[in-house]
Image (cartoon, rainbow, N blue to C red):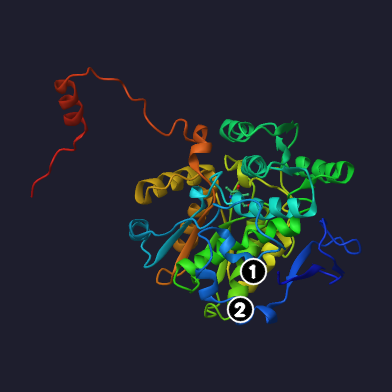
Amino acid sequence: MSYVKCLKAKESGTEYPIEPRTICDNDFSPVEVQYDYDAMRGKVTRESIEAGPRSLWRYKDLLPIEGEPRAGFNSGWTPLIKADRLAKKLGVDELYIKDDSANYPSYSYKDRVVSVAITKAAEFGFDTVGCASTGNLAHSVAAHAATAGLKSYVMVPHDLEEGKIVGSRVFGPTLVKIKGNYDDVNRLCAQIADRYGWAIVNVNLRPYYTEGAKTHGFEIAEQLGWRLPAHTVLPVAGGTILPKVWKAYQEFIKLGLVPDNKPAMYGAQAAGCNPIAKAVAEGSELFHPQKPDTIAKSIAIGNPADGYYVIQHLKESGGFAESATDPEILAAVRLLAETEGIFTEPAGGTTLACAIKLIESGRIPRDEPICVCITGNGLKTIECMAGQFEEVEPIEAKIAAFDTLVAGQSQPVVVG
Ligand SMILES: *Cc1c(COP(=O)(O)O)cnc(C)c1O
């Protein structure tokens, strides 16, 4: 049993059956899964959700699958951390970190979207799945395909971080390195989906894939004790997660599961790839595609597929967008690690750095609950931290040598 009705074009409203599809044939706008919310009322409740598994599948009623999940049995349900030490440092009252660097099995938010897409691929009867990826998606698709027993092709830009390449290859996909940036990879994948009849998770399974991102938002609401943060800061790459966390909040409001506190959404981008932040700063509804140049490679998408909708939701919710330079990103990675013990990749550093700028500029008030969404793990991108730490000289295995080292480290004590 499912509450799914159909696919519907976001612009023209043309309806389509549940099938592999990326966009509407008439107006080329994205298609979105529609649900029967009236039928959910009284059935999809806090209690029904709380009785579910400790994974993203506790929100199965709000996801576009028909039968039982086929992947992601341990994905989602990542920690929501009350970040008091970081809050004190930033001078804010109530700060939370939603930590998808701990997501399973591939340590990024992508395990959410891929769990739904792989389940849908299996439901549709595909035997081969693939993706256009900036790294984390390849890692997640390769891992989930291995668990579900599907063949996989992962397509990535040629200059990806080694951790993401090895992290993907170990699962045995066919890795295709493409000479070009993510936007070139994505264009090629649209052609591959047509020609080979494979399930490319973020192309012809995109409407189902993107729905998985809602679970990041559902979890924030449930883990906060069935309420929404006043301010939510999310990274923007292709523009999937931000609109879908917004949709998740609105669905919970519609179903009466949380009070409507008029949550505001904020987008974070790297200064070296900030088409959305730039458009928002200029008060424009449209963005200009860019050629990315930033260490935050997983969010370096110069022509975001759903960028238009990101701008809409930022405006509609009363939020804003920011961007952060590479040095600001690295400083934020270290701050999060030193205060909260979380090691994120540059995408997470971007989100925190932008949150800090939004707080300091007064866009986000210091006395209202704030959630900063960390979407990826720093152990996959350690080369970014090169040059961040001084060389460590080895010492003799003698206590005297250690004493000298400690004495050299301690600051002189100033009395009085
Ligand atoms: C993919 C990704 C994002 C967000 O991408 P969207 O396409 O905007 O949903 C954010 N952070 C990391 C680490 C990612 O891999």
- Residue visible at 36% across and 25% down in the picture: 391
Dot 2: few (<14), some (14–19), or many (≥20) neighbours within 10 Å? few
Query: Is residue 271 or residue 349 the one in the foreground?
Result: 349
Badge 2 is on which residue? Answer: 43
Badge 1 is on which residue? Answer: 61
In this picture, is 65 found above or below 140?
Answer: below
What residue occupies the far right of the structure in this picture?
26
On residue 77, the disc is none
Disc 2 marks a residue whose amino acid type is: Lys
Tell me the element at label 2. loop
Query: Is residue 122 or residue 324 the one in the foreground?
Result: 122
Q: Would you say the residues marked 1 and 2 are in contact, meaning their CB atoms lie under 8 Å apart?
A: yes
- Residue visible at 34% across and 60% down in the picture: 84
- Residue visible at 74% across and 61% down in the picture: 286
Dot 1: few (<14), some (14–19), or many (≥20) neighbours within 10 Å? some
In this picture, is 349 found above or below 173?
Answer: below
Tell me the element at label 1. helix
